[in-house]
Amino acid sequence: MQALYAQLLVGLINGSFYALLSLGLAVIFGMLNIINFAHGALYMMGAFVAYFLLQYSGLNYWWALILAPVIVGLFGILLERTMLKWLTGLDHLYGLLLTFGIALIVQGVFQNYFGSSGLPYAIPDLLKGGVNLGFMYLPIYRGWVVVFSLVVCLATWYLIEKTQLGAYLRAATENPTLVRAFGINVPLMITLTYGLGVGLAALAGVLSAPINQVRPLMGADLIIVVFAVVVIGGMGSIMGSIITGFALGVIEGLTKYFYPEASNTVVFVLMVLVLLVKPQGLTGRAA
Amino acid sequence: MRLAKQELQIDGTQQMTTLTTSSTGNSNPNALMRDEMWAFLIMTVLLALVPVSGIYPFFVMQALCFALFACAFNLLIGYGGLLSFGHAMFLGTAGYVTAHALKVWGVSPEIGIVLGVAASAALGVVTGLIAIRRQGIYFSMITLALSQLLYFIYLQVPFTHGEDGIQGVPQGMLFGIFDLSKPITLYYVVLVVFLLGFLLIYRTINSPFGEVLKSIRENEPRAISLGYKADQYKLMAFILSASLVGLAGAVKVFVAQNASLTDVHWTMSGEVVLIALVGGLGTVFGPVIGAFIIIAMQQYLASFGQWVLVIQGVIFVACVLTFRRGVIGEIGHYFRRSL
Amino acid sequence: MSNKLSALLLGTALSLGAVAGAFAQDKNIKIGVLTDMSGLYSDIGGQGSVIAAQMAVEDSGLTAKGWKIDIVSADHQNKPDIGTNIGRQWIDVEKVDIFMDVLNSGVGLAINNLVKEKNAIMINTGAATSDLTNAQCSPNTVHWVYDTYMLANSTGAALVKAGGDSWYFLTADYAFGAALERDTSAVVTKSGGKILGAVKHPLNSSDFSSFLLQAQASKAKIVGLANAGGDTTNSIKQAAEFGIVKGGQKLAGLLLFINDVHSLGLNVAQGLNFTETFYWDLNDQTRAFGKRYSERSKTKAQPSMIQAGVYAGLLHYFKALEAMGGNPHDGAKIVAKMKDMPTDDALFGKGEIQPNGRKIHPAYLFEVKTPAESKGPWDYYKLIGTTPADKAFRPLSESACPLVKK
């Protein structure tokens, strides 16, 4: 029973990565209507930028937490301005293919210069060590990851659903012509949204750097799962992907305990079931 | 500006329509048919001449298997508007069944192929029944999820030998006469299978069945109101596509002499999308050209070592940004007709 | 009639002589390095294997004696069908004589079948599966560096002897992981240890905390990592985080390469035990090789044992060809010659190739140094035990290979 608690907690920790990543994906899909397959590669870039900052300019983890999302976000904005914006109004497939191509390029270039086995990144001193919870030993860093991602997720949700800016954004995607008529710069908003989504991916990358090896392929293995989270949560739904992200982490944690081999597959079982029962995903608006 | 998006929001279904307009709307179907017959003849002659041309036959065989794979995939997306992200499951299933039957049960090649195709068709029935109940992006996702489940099953069951795959599959004598271990014989057998599959798809597209399928793609509620059972048509198309992919997977076993997890992995499902897209979605010959391009890239870029994935990525980006209709689609567009 | 016959015989004899002459003079060799250039294993094989092959060609001195040696290389992307296609084309069109590296068991077994069918050669230095020299052995294949049996045997037996008598496995859920777990369990039990359990994790997992917690709960003295690549490094890194080692349990990586240790950093990797058959800092000769290699490496890396195997394997192949006076392009015949000659090279020392194609040499059990012990980059290992060549690998008496006469 104690072991089960531990698995649930660990699952929640993993869930926070899923939530952060799928949140970015959902924001981008909701606003740009693009399935961003480069998300995994951008997540990886976040981790690498954190490594570079530490290695070459001596800026520590806390700086990386702020700077890496900005730097990678700017890179995302560049992508949007030069490539993705030509795809407006086209089928999803083209966005998917384009971003898939971008992912291949980014991963390939990193691999070429930094090898495949990865680079070390240490846990910041402040968050080293752990606490014994009785049923498990919880590394402090993991606890930090859960709290921090929850805050970021809720802040993003608030920004998009509850603020004036978010209202413009949502309106701009519903009816861009009309919103433009009100004097709002729609393409700029879309670019910034993509930057935000990418920044969230990079943030997840920084968070994971001390836990996982900083490897060029670290995002490639993750993207398909995150993809499934977004679908289960309801394409484009912000709250849906946050909740699903955390929930999936927990369910996966349980699977790891009862049937570990299937822990990477359980998300797809869920996806089939959800889509059969509720085709628009768990919280999807009647799309 | 966001036509597709708005459609999605209306009924969540029809966003695929914007993909495939090149094959419809031609004012003169007879001229189109004539062009296509000529193109088919030229293709057949060129392919038949491969062994005497000095081109390496195994490369062409591999490309032909993928071409058939992509043509069958294209039948669904190009003419049925159904984008499957899980078509690798049919390729892999047929591959495993055929390889196992040939190697362990020692059956003859024709039986092996029949078993492989039958397995894929059966899988097509089951997955089709689940998948066609959903539309648009949700159809894609459910096929992806099903193929991931299947990948897991193949990883777990012992007969597939995990990541080592089924290796050293004997090629045997087809119908007791054709020795498939001879490259030339194998080549022509693969070619004939490919051409038969291709003609079957071509025939289907231009049959009344195909017309109904296209009408469902364009406007499903209307097709239903005209009395067509849309779900049954879609299911039929799905099963046909699955069986033909199975045929490609079964024949591929004779070419590669192994069956492995690669063929069931989701990246393979992605690859067939790429092939069809590079060649031209919804065009008859596009997937064939696409298969040759992609397989050639894999084969000839392999010596670039670590840059191979980067080069592939650049090509995809360029493809989406500059010639979105695919090679054949762009050519057809240039000449103002479809191929 | 008899005139005609003798003319015919004479003609045949002449043409045979011509063939033999051409045979003796054919001094062309084409080497194909088939490996993972773009994926998970590109550091332990990849471009580094090509460098090792080039060094072998230069060090053999054969070009000065009139031999013409070419190297081609390709990325098999860890996919058996791509590997087979490239391989077949190499043999048919490019006339490649010998395949080097071929890491990844799936691709390795596929090329094993191919070289047998086409009578070419493979010196496999990268695949882990011991099937290559067991049930699926071939007269055209030499398996050089390591295999699952050897890894299990060396690491398992040594750790049990050192007091690690209860084990829990973290196993990658695929054939390679299962083989490692099975072989190691057998050795541990035979040496008097106990297996407390195992958890199978999916390939390419990013999070190992759940599995590590289960390992922790088992209270086993040794947590055996029956996985490879990113899975191993991630599980080691996260084990440190969860205090596995601090809690008194010991980690044993069953397959680790120096590149993995480098990427983990000594802070995390210190104290790990595992087996390799080559380390650059073993003796003067290996140090000299390591120095020359790292000067050429783009990342200034030291060679992995796979890359070292490419170098050593090729040199032995060249020796056999030189002894034959030319390249007969007859794979089985050359491999037979290679088996006849005892091996002796700078990197793996003295050894031999057994009838089943297994190259045997000593296996070294290493422990990763602490940051304080390490004197500089790539100074990572302490040698704590050596298994002699004849004890390290599967005994011939247990081999299921049909080539072994019993």
Image (spheres, coloured by chain):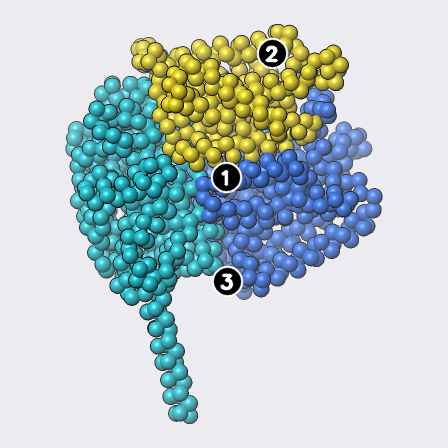
Chain colours: A yellow, B blue, C cyan
In the rendered structure, the answer to whether residue A208 lies left or right of residue B77 reads: left
Task: Have a look at marks 3 and 2 and say if they share a chain.
Answer: no
Could you say which disc has been placed on residue B182 in the image? 3
Quadrant of the rendered structure where residue C382 is?
top left
Task: Have a look at marks 1 and 3 and say if they share a chain.
Answer: yes
Kindly identify which chain the residue marked by label 2 belongs to.
Answer: A
Characterize the local packing of mark 1: few (<14), some (14-19) or many (20 or more) Cα atoms within 10 angstroms: many
CA gap between label 3 and label 2 equals 64 Å
Q: Residue placed farthest to the right in the image?
A: B27
Could you say which disc has been placed on residue A160 in the image? 2
Say which amino acid is labelled 3: Lys
Characterize the local packing of mark 2: few (<14), some (14-19) or many (20 or more) Cα atoms within 10 angstroms: some
Which residue corresponds to mark 1? B309
Q: Nearer the viewer, residue B231 or A242?
A: A242
Say which amino acid is labelled 1: Leu
Secondary structure of the residue carrying numbered label 2: helix
- Residue depth check, mark 3 versus mark 2: number of the one nearer the observer: 2
Kindly identify which chain the residue marked by label 1 belongs to.
Answer: B
The answer to whether C196 is drawn above or below residue A185 in the figure is below
The N terminus of chain C lies in which quarter of the figure?
bottom left
CA gap between label 1 and label 2 equals 36 Å
Secondary structure of the residue carrying numbered label 3: loop
Secondary structure of the residue carrying numbered label 1: helix
* Residue drawn at 66 percent across, 37 percent down: B322
Could you say which disc has been placed on residue A59 in the image? none
Characterize the local packing of mark 3: few (<14), some (14-19) or many (20 or more) Cα atoms within 10 angstroms: few
Residue contact between numbered discs 1 and 2, judged by CB atoms under 8 Å: no
Say which amino acid is labelled 2: Ile
The answer to whether A122 is drawn above or below residue B19 in the figure is above
- Residue C133, image x, y percentages: 30, 50
The answer to whether B108 is drawn above or below residue C221 in the figure is below
